[in-house]
Amino acid sequence: MLEYAIAHLVPGHLSEVRRGKEELINRTLAAVKERLTKEINYWDHRARVLRDQEAAGQVNARLNSGLARQRADELSARLQRRLAELDQERKLSAQPPVVVGGALIVPAALLRPAPAAPVERAADTSVSERLAIEAVLQAERRLGNEPRDVGHESAVTTSSRGHRATGCGSSRSRVGCVGPPRSRSRETRS
């Protein structure tokens, strides 16, 4: 995995980062040169003017030509230092990637224990069917319906919507209801 990343992913990522970095460095370089060159020119000019005034006998108590020359020199050194930093930032090189995490995808079927023997279906389900029918009948009675087992009837009726009318229970129910159908909407409070 690491070899694949080094061979295929890192070069593309590096070129993408390099393009963005080059644009940023070029904009920064232009702004730094413009600003610092203006300041250097200002302090060079100011130093010359102050030196001429000092030669004429006009002394400025707050600023002298030496201090103005020192500021111009500091700005020149700062410009050279900043240009060197920007030149260093252009020199990008890729380092080997560091794996932070990983994922192993395993199908759920492989995690379940395999059955010892194939599951056999019961030959006679009449007992469990009878218990289930009785449970549904009791539940329908609790709801106020009069259910009856219609599993033994061979005729299947159809509702007005074209669905099988099987009674109170679900669409697969063998239980039919006698009496008013129960309301499925909630009662509104006044």
Image (cartoon, rainbow, N blue to C red):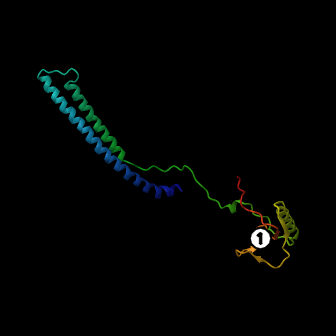
On the image, the x and y values in percent for residue 112 come to 72, 60
Work out whether residue 188 or residue 111 is closer to the camera in this orientation and state it: 188
Q: Which quadrant of the structure image shows residue 188? A: bottom right
116 versus 76 height, above or below: below
Work out whether residue 125 or residue 42 is closer to the camera in this orientation and state it: 125
Is 103 left or right of 114, judged from the image as shown? left
Is 182 left or right of 35, judged from the image as shown? right
Work out whether residue 163 or residue 68 is closer to the camera in this orientation and state it: 163
On the image, the x and y values in percent for residue 145 come to 82, 64
What is the three-letter code of the residue carrying label 1?
Arg
Outermost front residue: 190
Work out whether residue 19 or residue 81 is closer to the camera in this orientation and state it: 19
Q: Which quadrant of the structure image shows residue 116? A: bottom right
Q: Which quadrant of the structure image shows residue 117? A: bottom right
Outermost left residue: 56
Outermost bottom residue: 155
On the image, the x and y values in percent for residue 70 come to 24, 28
Residue at 62% in and 58% down: 105
Q: Secondary structure at mark 1?
A: loop
Is 90 left or right of 53, judged from the image as shown? right
Residue at 86% in and 65% down: 134
Is 25 left or right of 9, judged from the image as shown? left
**Mark 1: few/some/many CA within 10 Å (<14, 14-19, 20+):** few
On the image, the x and y values in percent for residue 37 come to 24, 39
Could you tell me how many numbered marks the image carries?
1
Give the labeled residue for mark 1. Answer: 172
Residue at 47% in and 55% down: 6
Q: Where does the N terminus fall, quadrant-wise?
A: bottom right
